[in-house]
Image (cartoon, rainbow, N blue to C red):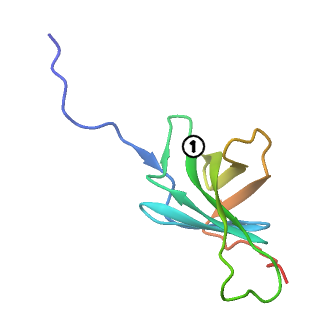
Amino acid sequence: AMATSGKPANVQRITSGPWGGPGIHIEVTEKSAKVEFDCAHGTIQGPLNLDSKGEFKLKGTFTRERGGPVRSDQNESSEPAVYTGSIKGETMTLELKLDGQDQALNSYVLTQGKTGRLHKCM
């Protein structure tokens, strides 16, 4: 009979800190991530684990923004979203889909440690 150690497998996670690219900036913490787009923002719920191939599929939210003044009684409308992608070295590819939709809203390439280049809605 083989004895097995009770150690859990080494779980890979998305590295904490900033990830950025054209039109996107993500701030990853140990338990979640905040996402800023040019004209939207969102969250990614953790844990932000990667599979053995460095890929991920994580649930979160997506909230569209609009330019101009915002009324104090105007509520933001977040939609459920799915963030999928992979990490190779310091490069992340990311695809955003609204929950229940087959077509991706957009895809991005981000670099670990970089600040995203955003052009916020005016």
**Percent coordinates x, y for residue 94 in the rendering:** 69, 51
Could you tell me which residue is drawn at 79 percent across and 79 percent down? 120
Q: 22 above or below 56?
A: below
Which residue is at 66% across, 73% downward? Answer: 76
Quadrant of the snapshot with the C terminus:
bottom right
In the image, farthest residue toward the right: 122
| Residue at x-position 23% and y-position 37% | 7
Residue 9 x/y as whole percent: 33, 36
The residue singled out by tag 1 in the image is: 56
The residue sitting at the top extreme is 1
Please state which amino acid type lies under the numbered disc 1. Phe
Task: Give 63 or 29, whichever is nearer the viewer.
Answer: 63
Horizontal and vertical percent position of residue 8? 28, 38
Number of labels in the image equals 1
Q: Is residue 104 visible?
A: yes
Q: Which quarter of the picture shows residue 18?
A: bottom right
